[in-house]
Image (cartoon, rainbow, N blue to C red):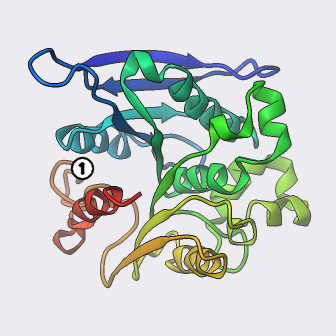
Amino acid sequence: MICKKIKIAVNTYEETADLYTYFLDNSIEMDMERKRPVIVICPGGGYAMTSDREAEPIAMQYLAKGYHAVILRYSVEPARYPLALLQLAKTVAFLRENAEEFHIDTNRIVVQGFSAGGHLAASLGVFWKKDFIAQTLGVSSEMVKPNGMILSYPVITSGEFAHTGSFECLLGDDYNNLDKRKEQSLEFQVSGDTPPTFLWHTVTDDCVPVENSLLFFNALRKFKVPVEMHLYPIGGHGLSLANEETGYKDGGCIQKECQSWMELTWNWLQNI
């Protein structure tokens, strides 16, 4: 396995992100030419931190299924939009640029985000063609385009069902600018160029309401973007794997009914 910690730097910004890589190496005993999909994991944390529970434990699950995985510890407050988005875009470009070295299938680069990390992943999915991204990074838009998105209880809307704290951390003083806040309401940013998406959420999420996923699902359907969504009738926010591996000492965030989501993503990944 090729494990590295790589600094992701963006022109004009002093602050950098850390990319932790888990690339499965090829073996002469099997297939030395094998190219694997890669999952880019964006942990949640309300744009105030990045959660350990939604980082390495998730990567290990994908590795066990033969996928590469990388974890992006993107910039959070006091950093403001669009730095985290640019860091994620540069990560995807980096993976494509170094695909030969790391045995990456460049047509199967999938971004996965949890909660506010889901907002970040979905932002790249809807904004990847924006000129400012390509111009800032000095690459073509196609280099930063994700081939798919896995969104776990994502923050999507800045409207009625918003997780207000995420947008306050993301935008800072610009939170009070209605136009800039609406721009970050991603249900309004979906187009036919948005990549295929897998969504899951719990109906009883009392932190990021399930309407966030429903709004995004409906927007994707409107533009005929392939989408799969799973709603679990019970469970709180921030479940991660929903099992003992990522649960709290007091038993919090262990929800047996929700543990199937990871297997469902493996099935979905076969078809993108």
Q: Residue at the spot x=20%, y=57% of the render?
A: 250
Quarter of the rendering occupied by the C terminus: bottom left
Q: How many marks?
A: 1
**In the picture, which quadrant includes the N terminus?**
top left
Residue 217 image offset from top left, x and y in percent = 55, 77
x, y percentage for residue 150?
44, 57
Question: Residue, x 23% and y 54% (percent of image)?
Answer: 247
* Quadrant position of residue 97: top right
Q: Residue at x 62, y 54 (%)?
A: 125
**Occupied quadrant, residue 10:** top right
Q: Amino acid at mark 1?
A: Thr
* Residue highlighted by disc 1: 246
Question: Along the horizontal axis of the image, is 97 left or right of 129?
Answer: left
Residue at the image position 63 percent from the left and 60 percent from the top:
194
Any part of residue 70 in sight: yes
Side (left or right) of 75 relative to 132? left
Q: In this image, 173 relative to 213: left or right? A: right
Viewer-nearest residue: 108 or 171: 108
Please, which residue is most extreme toward the left here?
29
Residue 110 versus residue 217 in the image, above or below = above
Left or right side of 156 for 154: left
> Relative to 127, is 141 above or below?
above
177 above or below 59? below
Q: Nearer the viewer, residue 90 or 171?
A: 90
- The quadrant in which residue 101 appears is top left
Residue 186, percent from left and from top: 69, 65
Image x and y of residue 14, in percent: 74, 17
Relative vertical location of residue 204 with respect to residue 21 in this rendering, above or below: below
